[in-house]
Amino acid sequence: MLNIFRRTKGAPRGEEYREVAVRADPPEGPGSPWKDSLGRASTRAAQVLLILVLGSIVIFGLLQVTLVVIPLIIALILAAAIGPLVNWLRRKGWPSALATAFSFLLLLGVLGGVITGIVFAVQSQADELVDSATQGFDKIYDFIISGPIPVDEQQIADAQEWLIDFATSATVGAGAVTGITAAGEFLTGAVLMVVILFFFLKDGDKIFAFILRPFKGERLVKARRVGIHGLETLGGYVRGTAIIALVDSVFIGVALFWLGIPLALPLAVIVFVGAFIPIVGATFAGALAALVALVSDGPTTALIVIVVVIAVNQIEGNFLQPVVMGRSLSVHALVILVALTAGTILAGIVGAILSVPLAAVTWSAIKSWNGEEDGPITPAEIKRAEIDTKADAVGRGRSSRPGRRIGSSIAKP
């Protein structure tokens, strides 16, 4: 409703309110139930339900093609992590094919070495590790049953069953009827991931320009912001998490060796892998190490292990993570926990690993689209975005130009 006390500029006396009368909201009739507060709330509720239905349909459709979706997401995350190396080599004068091939083979070599080391470190002592963990759990179970606080055995059994169902719930594995089928799907997904990763590294600019085709003007600038900041978030998250995981595994592994706890090497490897699952991963790895220490050396050593794990986690959360991760994961812990739970329910362990970086990228995309970090869009920036997109389309984009930094086309005011 306009201000009725404002006189229309330049209007002759007696006609000052004519514009107000023309532009005023029409009166609400008695036969318009959607005009009152309840009607507006119902309309908004219907819109929210429609969005939820559409989101559920999209998630259901993606879960039907997880053999394609999961390798695609993993390849995108790895490409974002190794992409700066490819761009740096190109700006140093390396041919595009040579820079891509070198970075691709280096990444595969590192991943292959890490996976091989994990397999050999855990495989030889896997049975002993499981037995120690089981014995430690049985000791805690007996202590709870015979302790001063009365606990029903059925409650413990229900809690144990719930934890097992939560950890193993995965729509991804619902179609794997036999071990051969599961192995075949894993190999197919691995090969597909490697192929997609190669094309992401080789033709990342062209793929980016193809995705940006529907956007023009200010929307093009916003879309470029979303893409560039999203890749920076993914890359920073993976590199930062790998550094933090290495530091955690080294410190906790050294403490386990110093205390003389058996299975120290596989426990350190589990700490490294668990660090890629925020909150839950570190807790699980520390609990497993404490259980093994409880069986081997008694409760005092187990308590020392718990103190060491807590201290390392505190150093990680208060010092190492802010320094290494920077703003890559500027998401509240509650959002991380919710995303982690949803990812585990939908896709098991793979969903637990991928859910947090996807949540971080989603939040980064929302902020970038709204311009919270880059400021208002200028005509010069629109022109620069159009030029950069055309350069990306022919493979001569920002990543291959000497002296150009990723995201430099998005100039802050």
Image: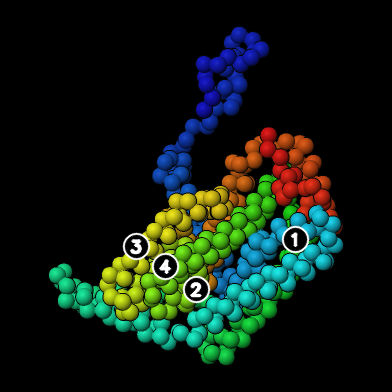
Q: Amino acid at mark 3?
A: Val
Residue drawn at the location 55% of the way across and 27% of the way down: 24
Q: Residue at x 60, y 71 (%)?
A: 70
Residue 297: where, in percent of width, then height?
31, 76
Q: Which residue is mark 4?
A: 255
Q: Which residue, given by chain and number where applicable, does mark 3 sit on?
A: 307
Give the quarter of the image for residue 165: bottom left
Label 2 vs 1, first from the N-terminus = 1
- Foreground mark, 2 or 1, reads 2
Which quarter of the image is occupied by the C terminus?
top right
Residue at 74%, 48% in the rendered image: 405
Within 10 angstroms of label 4, few (less than 14), some, or many (20 or more) residues?
Answer: some
Query: Which mark is nearer the camera, 4 or 3?
Result: 4
Image x and y of residue 60, in percent: 54, 70
Contact (Cβ within 8 Å) of mark 3 with mark 1: no
Which amino acid, mark 4? Answer: Ala
